[in-house]
Image (tube, helix red, strand yellow):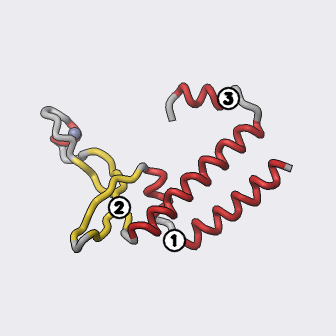
């Protein structure tokens, strides 16, 4: 999150902030579920080389990340797809847990609207 986004959140009413985060969490869980249904792969955390000359992190072997990638089979080959951190973490969760959390969020959302 950038500083600017943080400032925007602070100017909102508490109920709006709750609604925003619920909505974002729901969207993220839905994205993760879509990925799991579509690809049937596994989430792997990998460190990467940036390829820049003189990068200290790469020179001392620390590299960058770890970043999350989905490894999946397509046409008999292993493919890699980059996932944003939150989506990677969610996609690594069991499908049932994600579906349960989504139900919980929908219930919470129902309460905050009434
Ligand atoms: Zn580097």
Q: Is mark 1 within 8 Å of ligand 1?
A: no
Check disc 2 and report its element: helix, strand or loop.
strand
Q: In the rendering, at what x and y percent does residue 85 appear? A: 43, 50
Q: Earlier in the sequence, mark 1 or mark 2?
A: 2
The dot on residue 70 is 2
Q: Residue at x 24, y 49 (%)?
A: 48
* Left or right, residue 5 beside residue 112: left
Q: Residues within 10 Å of mark 2 (few under 14, many from 20)?
A: many
Q: Earlier in the sequence, mark 3 or mark 1?
A: 3
Q: In the rendering, at what x and y percent does residue 84 appear? A: 42, 49
* Left or right, residue 17 beside residue 59: right
Check disc 1 and report its element: helix, strand or loop.
loop
Choose between 54 and 93: the one closer to the eye: 93
Q: In the rendering, at what x and y percent does residue 101 appear? A: 64, 63
Q: Is mark 2 within 8 Å of ligand 1?
A: no
Check disc 3 and report its element: helix, strand or loop.
helix
Choose top left, top right, bottom left or bottom right for residue 81: bottom left
Choose top left, top right, bottom left or bottom right for residue 59: top left
Q: Residue at x 31, y 65 (%)?
A: 71
Residue annotated with mark 3: 10
Residue annotated with mark 1: 94
* Left or right, residue 95 beside residue 61: right
């Amino acid at each position: 999150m950038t500083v600017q986004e943080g400032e925007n959140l602070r100017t909102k009413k508490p109920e709006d902030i709750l609604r925003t985060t619920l909505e974002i969490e729901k969207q993220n869980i839905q994205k993760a579920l879509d990925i799991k249904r579509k690809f049937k792969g596994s989430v792997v955390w990998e460190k990467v080389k940036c390829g820049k000359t003189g990068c200290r992190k790469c020179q001392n072997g620390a590299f960058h990340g770890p970043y999350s990638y989905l490894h999946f089979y397509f046409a008999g080959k292993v493919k890699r797809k980059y996932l944003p951190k939150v989506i990677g973490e969610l996609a690594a969760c069991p499908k049932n847990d994600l579906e349960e959390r989504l139900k919980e969020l929908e219930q919470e959302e129902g309460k905050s609207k009434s």
